[in-house]
Amino acid sequence: MQARVISSSSSSGGGGACATTYEHGAHLTGWKASFDGDKDVVDVIFTSGSAIFKPPKAIRGGIPVCWPQFANYGPLELQHGFARNCAWKVTDEKEGSIEYTLTYDDIDDEQKAMVPGPFTLKIRHVVVDGTRMRTYMSVTNESEKELEFTTALHTYFVVGDITKTSVSGCKGLSYLDAPPHGSASSDRVLVDEDKDEKITFAGELDRIYFNTPNEVVIHDDARSLEIVVRKSIKGEEHLSELPDAVVWNPWIDKSKATGDLGDDEYKGFVCVETASVKNKINVPSTRTWSTAHEIEIRKK
């Protein structure tokens, strides 16, 4: 598969900031940020060293596009839907930005059976400047029936040490808590309120938080960095906000059981994903729904 690299303009303070993307899955697999005045770049997005870059296998890491279903939250048997497994087309490319498009004509008969009819799905990755990047997503329903789905931008973030990492912004929220790998039951348990100031990691953690605030922050103490994940963008209020957030780290046993993830790689990443899981998104015939998230890295 051929990689396409997008870079921010040096005149906007971007320095060496760049992102790597692929037509397979419209997948962003890496983003290197650059602070003003610094010669070195900072890796922000994690992709496994064991990732398989061979369609139709989804790439492990980066920003997988989960559509038209997140996990098993919907009628499909296919985990996370099919968008991340498909070959997309590049429909626009310029400095700092690339747009990928997937249509009904691009998918196979089995995948067509998973949607009510024709659609156009677009993903645009934008390197805004040295410390910010955005991913835009839009879905146009071209069928005569309503298009219903759950979704997530399943983002993997590099951290220096998962045991020295925490996530803030979820205190007081309800969430679904998944049992650890190997448990007798796979059913998630509803927790009415997270009473902790920050989420910390000392074992496998897989939670879906509901009705999250605009910003959820990853505190990477090992690298003295903070990564802000925003579900709305100032000046673009026409975009819909993804209401939920998924926080995940597989820890030891699940990492060992995952073929395209190194046994010890759990130590160096955390997933914080903007998502719509609890309530399905409904797009009427001929209408377009759109959303975005913004990621910003800053020094502590």
Image (cartoon, helix red, strand yellow):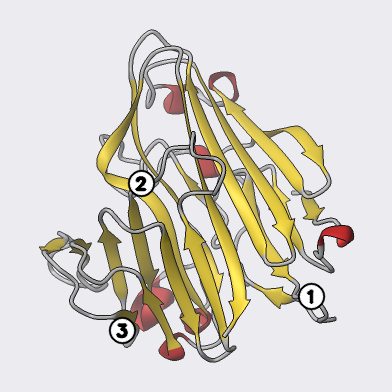
Residue 160 locus on image (x, y percent):
56, 86
Viewed as shown, does residue 49 lie left or right of 282?
Answer: right
Mark 3 is on which residue type? Answer: Gly
Q: Secondary structure at mark 1?
A: loop
Name the one closer to the observer, 236 or 189.
236
The quadrant holding residue 16 is bottom right
Residue 203 image label: 3
Callouts 3 and 2 close, C-beta under 8 Å = no
| Label 1 neighbour load within 10 Å: few <14, some 14-19, many 20+ | few
Residue 53 locus on image (x, y percent):
65, 55
For residue 46, say whether it is visible. Answer: no
Count of picture labels = 3
Viewed as shown, does residue 188 lie left or right of 131?
Answer: left
Viewed as shown, does residue 275 lie left or right of 119?
Answer: left
Q: Secondary structure at mark 2?
A: loop
N-terminal label among 1 and 3: 1
Q: Is 103 situated above or below 160?
A: above
| Label 3 neighbour load within 10 Å: few <14, some 14-19, many 20+ | some
Residue 63 image label: none
Mark 2 is on which residue type? Answer: Phe
Mark 1 is on which residue type? Answer: Asp
Q: Nearer the viewer, mark 2 or mark 1?
A: 1
Residue 90 locus on image (x, y percent):
73, 34
Q: CA distance from mark 3 to mark 2?
A: 23 Å
Q: Secondary structure at mark 3?
A: loop
Q: CA distance from mark 2 to mark 1?
A: 37 Å
Q: Nearer the viewer, mark 1 or mark 3?
A: 1
The quadrant holding residue 120 is top right
- For disc 2, the marked residue is 70
- For disc 1, the marked residue is 36
Q: CA distance from mark 1 to mark 3?
A: 36 Å
At x 15%, y 59%, the residue is 187
